[in-house]
Image (cartoon, rainbow, N blue to C red):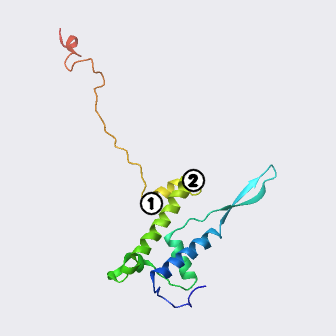
């Protein structure tokens, strides 16, 4: 399983990668369940749903097992002390993003939330062009008969 409680260090990038792979396997084997009511009697059925892979989920997994309580230093390379972890951290980021985007595109996860989490927004440029209400009437034609008397 994990290290004893109180242990707060991951020694190698390979160890971090293995913990991540263990987390992915755990998430895949631990679905969430959605209650659905089926038939005219409204029979309860539980539909298994895939659990998305997230950084927060990975960090909670590590904390729950007593491996480490905070992974932020590894991912932020605090004070340049975690340079040797950069390749694995980059790979973990890509794996999380790939799972979320792919799951959103396949309809497994909510595509709107997936897009927001991964900064995937469709940008539209809108230009307002002002046009006259009556383009065939010249500006001073309108009231010329009213002023003649």
Please name the residue that numbered disc 2 is placed on.
Answer: 106
Residue 62's disc number: none
Q: Residue at x 42, y 58 (%)?
A: 119
In contact (CB < 8 Å): disc 1 and disc 2: no
Establish if 146 lies above or below 61: above
Give percent across and percent down for residue 139.
Answer: 21, 21
Left or right relative to 35: residue 20: left
Which corner quadrant holds the C terminus?
top left
Left or right relative to 129: residue 124: right
Q: How many marks?
A: 2
Give percent across and percent down for residue 137.
Answer: 25, 17
Which corner quadrant holds the N terminus?
bottom right
Mark 2, residues whose alpha carbon is within 10 Å: few (<14), some, or many (≥20)?
Answer: few
Query: Quick one: 136 or 63, which is closer to the camera?
Result: 63
Q: Nearer the viewer, mark 1 or mark 2?
A: 2
Q: Residue at x 42, y 70 (%)?
A: 90
Establish if 116 lies above or below 76: above
Give percent across and percent down for residue 52.
Answer: 56, 65
Give percent across and percent down for residue 43.
Answer: 79, 56
Residue 88, quarter of the rendered image = bottom left
Please name the residue that numbered disc 1 is placed on.
Answer: 118
Please tell me whether mark 2 sits on a helix, a strand or a loop.
Answer: loop
């Amino acid at each position: 399983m994990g290290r004893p409680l109180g242990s707060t260090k991951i020694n190698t990038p390979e160890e971090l990668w293995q913990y991540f792979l263990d987390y992915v396997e755990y998430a895949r084997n631990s679905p969430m369940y959605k209650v659905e009511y089926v038939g005219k009697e409204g029979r309860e059925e539980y539909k298994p749903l895939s659990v998305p892979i997230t950084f927060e989920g990975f960090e909670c997994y590590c904390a729950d097992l007593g491996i480490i309580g905070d992974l932020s230093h590894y991912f932020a390379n605090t004070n340049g002390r975690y340079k040797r972890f950069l390749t694995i951290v980059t790979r973990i980021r890509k794996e999380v993003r790939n799972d979320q985007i792919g799951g959103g595109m396949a309809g497994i996860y909510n595509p709107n939330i997936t897009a927001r989490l991964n900064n995937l927004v469709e940008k539209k440029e809108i230009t307002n062009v002002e046009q006259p209400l009556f383009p065939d009437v010249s500006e001073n034609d309108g009231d010329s008969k009213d002023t003649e008397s």
